[in-house]
Image: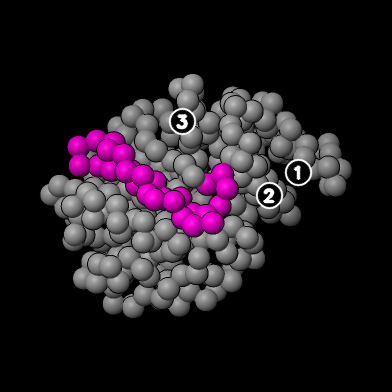
Amino acid sequence: MQPAKAEIRQMGEGLYLITLCPPVTGFEQFIGAWAYTGEKNFLVDVGPSVTSGSLFKALQTLGIHTLDYIFLTHIHLDHGGGIGEMARFFPTTPIVCHKIGIPHLIDPTRLWEGTLKTLGPVGKAYGPVMPVSADRFIDASLFKSDFIKVLITPGHAAHHVSYMTGKNLFAGETGGVCLELPSGHIYLRPATPPRLFLDTAVESIDQLLVHNPAVINYGHYGSRKNAVKMLKMHKGQLLHWEQVISNVMRHTEAEFFEETCLKNLLKSDPFLTNFSSLDSAVQERELGFLKNSIRGFLGYLRSRTA
């Protein structure tokens, strides 16, 4: 199975969502890179290495032959795995990344091994990470620009960064995963892999709210024009999950814990209401991520009571 051609959608003036399709069933409308053209040309996230060729061709189609910056929200392979290839396609472009993530992109051995351990066949399908020279990186916390605002937003990962230009927020996974359904409704879920630090995740959302973004551009997937509302909804969702999972912990035997949490959340979380309307392959993908997020909460709650 080969990666599909990248799809390009214009989402605003000079703003394009490039959909990257790794060779994994159910991942066809899930991973996005954001290209911006204007006063500066930049890219936010690059997707996995297996789709790097498709991304480069999409940028050429848009007439983007040079980039002022490549911004990484974090180094997970579905966001930063193709940075080695993109660094070669754009050999003079600085790469802005959280300082914690930079060593893992200079020498991606541990990143690749950890991905295979966590994601198995999906990680393998994303493709390995090519190393990048240390001199290509800028520590996001030191990056200064009148045009781009850097917001350090750990929670989904310790090395997570969000970016703003004007009222456009590139949130990575700070606002969770948001899918727009053909019905016009949304499906929203946490992206809280083990181990979750809930207080940190909530603080990161609060930091984004302070900047009052108008549009939120998700890593997964697409864009919403009611950014503040979406961030508040996701914050409430995280707190709801904490309550539900805490209750299950108190009343359920360990062997039934994960399935009971899943059942209760699908029933009680209003933003998961449309789960059953997802395509069967997408449901399978989402079940894996939902269970992973439950494990993230479990690790957090256990650490709090230890």
Query: Which callout, 3 or 1, points to the residue nearer the camera?
Result: 3
Q: Is residue 79 above or below residue 91?
A: above
Q: Nearer the viewer, residue 271 or 20?
A: 20
Disc 3 and disc 1: Cα gap in Å? Answer: 26 Å
Q: Nearer the viewer, residue 290 or 17?
A: 17
Which amino acid type is shown beneath numbered disc 2? Arg
Q: Residue furthest top?
A: 183
- Asked if the stretch drawn in magenta spans residue 18, the answer is yes
Give the residue displayed 41% in from the left and 42% down from the top: 218
Mark 2 lies on residue: 295
Question: Could you say whether the residue bearing mark 1 is in a helix, strand or loop?
Answer: helix
Crowd class of label 2 (few under 14; some 14 to 19; many from 20; radius 10 Å): many
Residue range in magenta is 1-27
Q: Position of residue 266 (x, y in %)?
A: 67, 30
Q: Is residue 92 above or below residue 292?
A: below
Q: Is residue 204 visible?
A: no
Question: Could you say whether the residue bearing mark 3 is in a helix, strand or loop?
Answer: strand
Would you say the residues marked 2 and 1 are in contact, meaning their CB atoms lie under 8 Å apart?
yes
Question: Could you say whether the residue bearing mark 2 is in a helix, strand or loop?
Answer: helix
- The quadrant the C terminus occupies is bottom right
Give the residue displayed 80% in from the left and 39% down from the top: 250
In the displayed structure image, the side of residue 191 where residue 48 appears, left or right = left
Rendered image quadrant of residue 17: top left
Mark earlier in primary sequence (2, 1): 1
Labelled disc at residue 258: 1
Give the residue displayed 59% in from the left and 57% down from the top: 122
Which amino acid type is shown beneath numbered disc 1? Glu
Labelled disc at residue 55: none
Mark 3 lies on residue: 180
- The quadrant the N terminus occupies is bottom right
